[in-house]
Image (tube, rainbow, N blue to C red):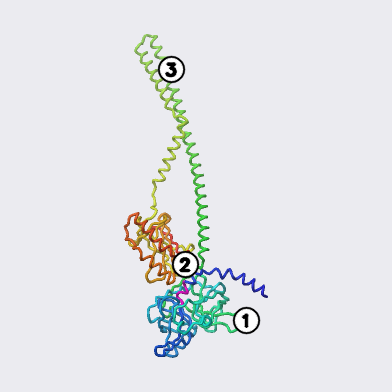
Amino acid sequence: MRRLALLLLALVAPAIAQAEPADIDAAARGVVRIVIVEIDGERLIPLSHGTGFAVGPEQIVTNAHVVAEARADDSLAIGIVPSEGAEAVYGRIVAVSTRNDLALLATTAPMNLPPLTISGNPLRDSGAVTAVGYPMNVDRAQGLSSGDIFRAHPPVKSTGFLSGRRSTREFDSLLHTAPIARGSSGGPLLDDCGRVVGVNSFGTQSGSADAEFYFAVSTRELLPFLRANDVTPQVNASPCRSLAELEAAERERAERAQQAAQAQAAAEEQTLARRRDETRREVEFAVFAERESGLALSMVLLMAALAASGLAVHAYHIDLRHNAEIGFALAALAVLCAGVAWVNRPGLDDIEMRLEDRLRAEMAAEASGPIRTAAPGRMVCVLQPDRSRITGSAAQDVPFDWSPDGCVNGRTQYGFANGVWTRILVPASEAAVSVNRFDPQTLEYRVERYLLGTMAMSRARAARSEFKAPSCGITEPEASEFGAVQATVLSLLPERPNERLVYSCSPAGD
C-alpha cells in the first residue's frame, strides 16, 4: 500500500509543479484576512476570521458564513487585513447571497488592492489547483497573538487537484483536494496561472483514515453574483500556458520560420539559376544570329566587290576609263564595308557581358516596384493569442503611431538599446511594471508585465525616479542614452514576466 501511494505521488508531482509560482504569488497579494471584531472601548477583540480576495481596488469577495456574525449583530465590525504593506481597515457588507455562500464587501478607506483575475474558461473535472487563505491552525502553530491577527502576513498556499464538479442542493461547486481549514473560507481557488476558478467554502467531515475533500463555489455562481451587484470583474478565458511552454513554441516557430526561409532561398536560387540559363540561351542565340548576319553581310559585300572589280576591268579594256575608276572605287568600298561588318560581329565573350547586363536590368526593374516602408506611421497592432501568455485582461487591438525617432502615439518616447526600442513603465498606483518593445523591421509590438510585491515595487519606483523620461523628438544619441538608463529598472525585475502580450502591427489602412 505504501509503495502504491509513493507511485501515485510520483505521478501527480509533475502536474503540481506546473504552476507558475510568480503567478500564484501575484494573486496572493490580492488576498486579505477578514476579521470579525468586537470593539471594547479602545480594544479590538477578534472573534473569528476568514479569507477574502479583491475583485476591485476596494471590493472584496468572501463567503457569506464568514460575515454572518457581523451581519446578525450591528455591534460587531469587520476588519480587513491586507497580505502585505498597508494598514488594516474596516469593511462594510455590500451584498450577501446565503444560497451560494457568497458575500461582497467594500473597504471604508482606500487600500488599492490588486484585483484577482477570474477564469472565464475554468477547469471542469481535473487539473492542478492552489488554495490561498488564512487557516487558523497555522496561526495557532505559529503562536500568533490577537494583535498579530491585525498585522499583514502572507497567506498560506496549498496545492491539490480538482476532483470533479459536484453541485450541492443549492449551488454549483467544485470538489478538490487542495487542503483548507477553518479561516480559509472565502479564499480563492486558483489555476496554474493564478486565476480564480472558485471560492473555497467548506470541507468534508472524515475520519483520519479517509481522504480529505473540499468544496469551492464555482465561477458559474461567482460571476453572476458580481455582475448583479454592479461589479465588473477582470475575466480571462485564454488557455493557461506556462512561459516555458510558450518559449518552446516560440523556438519551434523560429525554427520553422528559418527552415521556411532556407527553403524559400533555395527555391529562389533555383528560380534564379533557371532564369539565368534561359537568359543565357536567349543571349547566345542573339549573339550567334548577329555573328551569322555579320558573316553573311561580309560575304555579300565581298561578292559585290568582286563583281564591281570585274566590271571595272572590263570597262578599262574597252577604254572606258572613267567607268573603270568608278568600278574600282565601288569594289574598294565594298571590301572596306565587308571588313567593317566582319570586325563588328559580336565576339563570344560578349555573351557573358550581355548576360550580366540583362540580369542587372531585370533586377533593377523588380526593385523599382512599389516598396512598403519598414515601419509606417499609423498602425493597428493585433494581439496574437497563440504567441501570448495572458493572465489578466488584454486589449485585442492597439492603435500604434510610430515615428522613426522612437516616439509612439505622439507622446511616449522609447529608448534604444541593444538593437531594440524599449519603454519601461512604472506606475505610481498599480503594483506592476510593464516593459514595452517594438521592432520597426518585423512590426512586432511586445508587452511584458511583471506583477511585483510591495518591496520590489518600491525598489522599481526608486530606480525609475532617478531619471526623467524625455519628450518626443530626441536625437539618436539621446535615444541610446535613454535606453541605457532604463536598464537600471530592468535589472531589478524577475527573470521572467507574469504576462507576455505579442502584437502584430500593420498600417491602419490595411
Q: Which residues are magenta?
A: 26-31
Q: Is residue 27 magenta?
A: yes
Q: Position of residue 28 (x, y in %)?
A: 47, 74
Q: Which residue is mark 1?
A: 210
Q: Which mark sits nearer the N-terminus, 3 or 1?
A: 1
- Using the image as rendered, state which of residue 130 and residue 263 is in the foreground: 130
Mark 2: give few (<14), some (14-19) or many (20+) Cα within 10 Å. Answer: many
Under mark 2, the amino acid is Asn
Residue placed at 47% from the left, 69% from the top?
A: 391
Residue placed at 38% from the left, 62% from the top?
A: 399
In the displayed structure, would residue 427 be above or below residue 300? below
Q: Position of residue 59 (x, y in %)?
A: 41, 79
Q: Position of residue 175 (x, y in %)?
A: 56, 78
Is residue 224 visible to us here?
no
Q: Name the image quarter holding residue 152.
A: bottom left
Under mark 3, the amino acid is Leu
Q: Which residue is mark 2?
A: 498
In the displayed structure, would residue 321 be above or below residue 139? above
- Using the image as rendered, state which of residue 268 and residue 44 is in the foreground: 44
